[in-house]
């Protein structure tokens, strides 16, 4: 795809400084910029590459003031990092399948209802009485059970498994290996020490504009619903247990696990390998740093927490410094 500086300025609501007809056909990191490539500069620690990069076009923040001459044509935008995300989405959308196609090697039924321009790949299965919204892409070997409600403009990559009765909103992306609606880990102890399986009869409800990474799982509720709010981002290899509620626009990195019936607020951030015990409440705007362990309610929002069990991140670092010093003495 060929992009000109003039077009980028129009797309990203920016301004051009230099040759508005400068062209780029590839994207590159700023340190790898070559003629014909497009790069961006957002992190100050990469500023040295602004002056050495051979990229034809460079997206920068509107208030960036170069300290040396810059070879590239600059496209100044309000936020370079957000703008490059918008650009990548635009390029990705151009590459997506837009035409209506239902493979003859897929399986679906008379009671399955498809909207306009739905793509169904080879060996996909869409169950009875399931509805699929306009523009949704169901790639090869996807399984969607009966009585599901799938929104518009979703993308399900190969190997996604959606159990019967699940509800998925619009603009949802599920990557390969995602499982939505498996039974939760519910077992009752018997007198002899063995376990009685507890049936799970609820479902999973996923809101709009959600993305779930490869091989992550969201379990169905015992009763009622496990709920993933609007705008949630879940990385690869995450585990969401039965009856969990995730608030809007919360994001979690790989290997995060949330135990059953916990309620997570809105706009939370969980770094890699965060573990949260069951039946807890996590306040809005909570940030938990990598490998944080949560064993109690977090009632005050806006905190940055670290450790296991988690405490204030700055306090943790002070305690760690003392601990490290004591170990060295």
Image: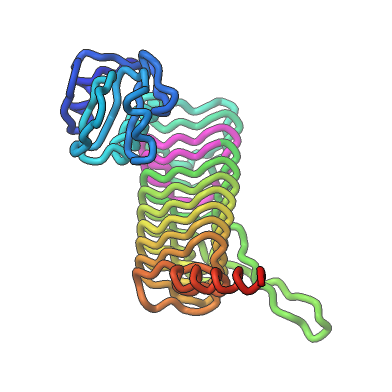
Dividing the picture into quadrants, the one containing residue 185 is: bottom right
Residue 216 in sight in this render: yes
Q: Residue at x 56, y 44 (%)?
A: 214
Q: Residue 275: give x, y in percent of width and height.
A: 57, 66
Query: Most extreme residue toward the front, as rendered?
Result: 329
Q: Residue 31: give x, y in percent of width and height.
A: 42, 27
Query: Most extreme residue toward the bottom, as rendered?
Result: 191
Q: How many marks?
A: 0
Dividing the picture into quadrants, the one containing residue 127 is: top right
- Compared with 18, 158 (above or below) is below
Q: Residue at x 31, y 17 (%)?
A: 56
Location of the C terminus (image quadrant): bottom right
Residue 201 in sight in this render: no
Location of the N terminus (image quadrant): top left
- The span picked out in magenta is 132-157
In this rendering, position of residue 166 left or right of residue 22 = right
Residue 166 located within the stretch drawn in magenta: no
Q: Name the one closer to the observer, 179 or 42.
A: 42
Query: Most extreme residue toward the right, as rendered?
Result: 192
Q: Residue at x 69, y 74 (%)?
A: 187
Dividing the picture into quadrants, the one containing residue 59 is: top left
Q: Name the one closer to the observer, 226 or 123.
A: 226
Q: Residue 94: give x, y in percent of width and height.
A: 36, 25
């Amino acid at each position: 795809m060929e992009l000109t500086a003039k077009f980028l300025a129009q797309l990203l609501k920016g301004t051009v400084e230099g040759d508005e007809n400068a062209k780029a056909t590839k994207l590159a990191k700023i340190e790898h910029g070559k003629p014909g490539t497009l790069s961006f500069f957002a992190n100050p620690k990469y500023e040295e590459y602004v002056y050495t990069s051979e990229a034809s076009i460079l997206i920068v923040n509107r208030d960036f003031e170069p300290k040396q001459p810059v070879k590239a044509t600059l496209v100044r935008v309000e936020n370079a990092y957000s703008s490059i995300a918008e650009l990548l989405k635009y390029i990705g959308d151009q590459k997506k399948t837009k035409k209506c196609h239902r493979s003859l090697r897929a399986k679906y039924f008379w009671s399955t209802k498809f909207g306009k321009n739905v793509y169904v790949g080879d060996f996909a299965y869409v169950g009875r009485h399931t509805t699929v919204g306009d523009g949704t892409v169901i790639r090869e070997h996807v399984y969607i059970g009966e009585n599901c409600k799938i929104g518009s403009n979703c993308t399900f990559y190969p190997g996604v498994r959606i159990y019967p009765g699940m509800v998925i909103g619009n603009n949802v992306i599920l990557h390969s290996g995602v499982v939505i609606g498996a039974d939760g880990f519910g077992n009752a102890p018997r007198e002899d020490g063995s376990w009685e399986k507890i049936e799970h009869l609820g479902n999973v409800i996923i809101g709009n504009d959600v993305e779930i990474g490869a091989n992550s799982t969201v379990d169905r509720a015992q009763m009622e619903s496990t709920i993933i709010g609007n705008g949630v981002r879940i990385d690869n290899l995450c585990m969401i247990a039965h009856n969990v509620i995730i608030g809007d626009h919360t994001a979690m990195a790989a290997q995060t696990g949330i135990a059953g019936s916990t309620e997570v607020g809105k706009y939370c951030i969980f770094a890699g390998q965060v573990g949260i015990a069951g039946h807890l409440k996590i306040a809005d705007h909570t940030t938990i740093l990598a490998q944080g362990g949560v064993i109690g309610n977090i009632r005050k929002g806006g905190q940055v927490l670290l450790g296991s069990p988690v405490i204030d991140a700055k306090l943790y670092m002070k305690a760690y410094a003392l601990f490290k010093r004591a170990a060295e003495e």
